[in-house]
Image: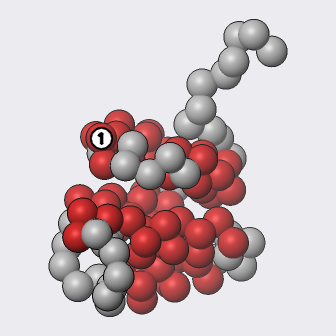
Amino acid sequence: MKYAYASEQDLYPVRLCFEVLIRNHKDGSGLKMVETILNEFPQDTPLSNLVKMVVDSIKIKDFLMFKTFLNTYKPELMRDGQFPEYLDRIAKYYFNDTIKQANPMQ
């Protein structure tokens, strides 16, 4: 990436991976597309490793492992305010569950 802060260069490809998983969840092509995107990463970063583990947990359909990865990488996920929303939608589409806690006020 030519025009980005060095500390943010991993955010854009990861956001793309999450978008691809969300938009292509019905036909299952998202997993293959994300693996292709990950092969083009210039270097491994904590977020790229998280995406790989998210893909693995989707493949084996293990929601508990998915949540464990998200808790482990929470500081990295907080770098972008959209990531929790993306991951909640991924949880909904692939695991039929949610990572958000229920709001007791509703």
Image quadrant where one finds the N terminus: bottom left
Residue under pointer 1: 75
Q: Number of callouts in the render?
A: 1
Q: Is residue 35 above or below residue 101?
A: below
Foreground residue among 71 and 82? 82
Q: Quadrant of residue 53?
A: bottom left
The answer to whether residue 46 of the structure is visible from this angle is: yes
| Drawn side of residue 21 relative to residue 32, left or right | right
Q: Is residue 55 above or below residue 41?
A: above
The color scheme shown is secondary structure
Instruction: Measuring from the top left, give residue 55's x and y in whole percent.
Output: 44, 66
The residue positioned 47% from the left and 79% from the top of the image is: 34
Image quadrant where one finds the C terminus: top right
The answer to whether residue 95 of the structure is visible from this angle is: no
| Drawn side of residue 57 relative to residue 50, left or right | right
Q: Is residue 92 above or below residue 34?
A: above
Foreground residue among 8 and 72? 8
The residue positioned 59% from the left and 32% from the top of the image is: 100
Tell me the crowding category of disc 1: few under 14, some 14 to 19, or many 20 or more residues within 10 angstroms, Cα based.
few
Which structural element holds mark 1? Answer: helix
Q: Quadrant of residue 57?
A: bottom left
Q: Is residue 68 above or below residue 40?
A: above
Foreground residue among 26 and 70? 70
The amino acid type of the residue labelled 1 equals Pro
The residue positioned 75% from the left and 10% from the top of the image is: 105
Instruction: Measuring from the top left, give residue 37's x and y in whole percent.
Output: 42, 85
